[in-house]
Amino acid sequence: MNIGRHTLIGVPYLWLLLLFLVPFGIIFKISLSDIALAIPPYTPSLDLSEGWPGVRDFLRQLDFENYVFLTEDALYWKAYLSSLKIATISTFLALCVGYPIAYAMARAASEWRPTLMMLVILPFWTSFLIRVYAWIGILSTEGYLNQLLLWLGIITDPLQIMNTPTAVYIGIVYTYLPFMILPIYATLERMDDSLLEAAEDLGCSRLSAFWIITFPLSRSGIIAGCFLVFIPAIGEFVIPSLLGGSGTLMIGKVLWEEFFSNRDWPVASAVAIVLLLILVIPIILFQKNQEKTQEADA
């Protein structure tokens, strides 16, 4: 019995070890190395084949010059701040769009809810890259959106939406909107409707009952949805590259350029480590929120 329980618990820890801790250790090791004209393009600072003498020499010569370089070059900290800004605004916009949709789904007739759920997750049946490329045809100067607005007479000249932060916000909100809708819907769908009926019987209007009862009870779903959108959005690379153009500065683009354009793997690894440390904070907060939700449900 104990063997089976330990095996069951050990599987996710083994998964975490192989797919997170080991790659993290490799990237951290590269971040402490020096760039070189070689394949791979860095000089290893730690050679495990040398045994303990190699580890000892590594500890003696240990330096964090690549991390210091990130603080000295304004490009990197501006990219981090820009990524935080774009991810925060995108998360707020996704919440503003996703909450009404989730609320409408939860208040729909029970026989319609599976269909509405399918419509929310339907975009996942299509390639992420194809969906982002489709927005180029919609938002470009000759795209469908400008053609529609010109035909309706709302504008006289085509709008410049592509290669702007607006296009990036649209792409991120569209892509990660289901991650906002689903946890909020799950919370609202479990809510007891008798609470709203009691509030209305006591003199509350529907709007007052919403702010007093519905919104507070859906807070756990809101927090979960915000984290599920914010965490991947901060390191997004494809959307700002295709929709934002060269003028959009995000850390994911900087990371790609360091790895593949500049071939500076040590600095790129340092950028990745710092980004991961930044993401650890919302991940821990998300985990604590999930634990509190499970305790409340119990």
Image (cartoon, rainbow, N blue to C red):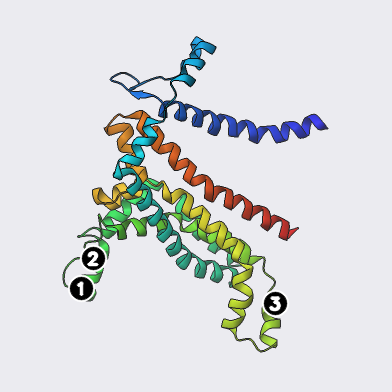
What numbered label is drawn on residue 169? none
| Separation of marks 2 and 3 at Cα, in angstroms | 46 Å
Residue 5: % across, % down: 77, 34
Do the residues under discs 3 and 1 have CB atoms within 8 angstroms? Answer: no
Specify which label sits upstream in the sequence, 1 or 2: 2
Q: Which residue is mark 3?
A: 195
Residue at x 44%, y 40% (from the top left corner): 274
Secondary element at tag 2: helix
- Density class for disc 3 (Cα within 10 Å; few <14, some 14-19, many ≥20) is few
In the image, farthest residue toward the front: 60
Three-letter amino acid code at disc 2? Asn
Q: Which residue is mark 1?
A: 155
| Separation of marks 3 and 1 at Cα, in angstroms | 47 Å
| Separation of marks 1 and 2 at Cα, in angstroms | 8 Å
Nearer to the camera, 220 or 276? 276
Q: Which residue is mark 2?
A: 146
Residue 263: % across, % down: 30, 29
Residue 147: % across, % down: 22, 66
Three-letter amino acid code at disc 1? Ile
